[in-house]
Image: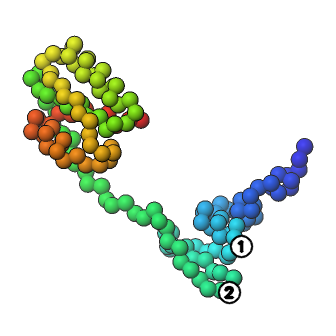
Amino acid sequence: MPSMQNQADRQPLWKRAAMAKGKRRAPLASLALLLGLPFAVTPGAADERHSASADGERSTVLNPTGTPPAIERRPLAERPASLDGKTVYLVDVTFNGGDLLLREMQEWFAAHMPGVKTEYRAKQGAYFADDPALWAEIKAAGGLMIMAIGH
């Protein structure tokens, strides 16, 4: 059975350095340790890191993830009392299999709720891209939509 020392020797350098210090290091700090650079986190600045080179020159590394903007809360859309006589848009964002699901839903509506008109549409661009023409069309028809996003 291998000893604990042999198992520790098989750990990557960054992991051994973190274990020796008794705490987990951030990936950026681990990279600095791997390269043999001293690395310190400035107190009170979680998104800013400093590193000193061999000649003592310090560099600042900023966290590229940033801070997301605040989210504006909006109320849910008002729900219609009935779907009879309404048009429901089935919007596909072209994610794998979304079109199959929406076509099946369209068949279900035709068989079980014949008073509801369905319109299948494929959204332009990726799922996160805006499609103002499609949104305007849906809004003009009464604003009812089912979107197949995926996952």
Question: Residue 36 — which label?
Answer: 1
Mark 2 lies on residue: 55
Pointer 2 with pointer 1, Cβ within 8 A: no
Query: Horizontal placement of 47 versus 5: left or right?
Result: left
Q: Residue furthest top?
A: 111
Does residue 22 appear in this view?
A: no
Cα separation, mark 2 vs mark 1, equals 13 Å
Q: Residue at image x 88%, y 50%? A: 3
Query: What's under tag 1, amino acid-wise?
Result: Gly
Q: Residue at image x 20%, y 31%? A: 89
**Quarter location, residue 82:** top left
Query: What's under tag 2, amino acid-wise?
Result: Asp
**Quarter location, residue 12:** bottom right
Does residue 5 appear in this view?
A: yes
Ranked by sequence position, the earlier of labels 2 and 1 is 1
Q: Position of residue 5 (x, y in %)?
A: 86, 55
Query: Horizontal placement of 117 versus 33: left or right?
Result: left
On screen, 91 above or below 115? below
On screen, 20 above or below 115? below
Q: Position of residue 50 (x, y in %)?
A: 57, 77
Query: Horizontal placement of 40 versus 15: left or right?
Result: left
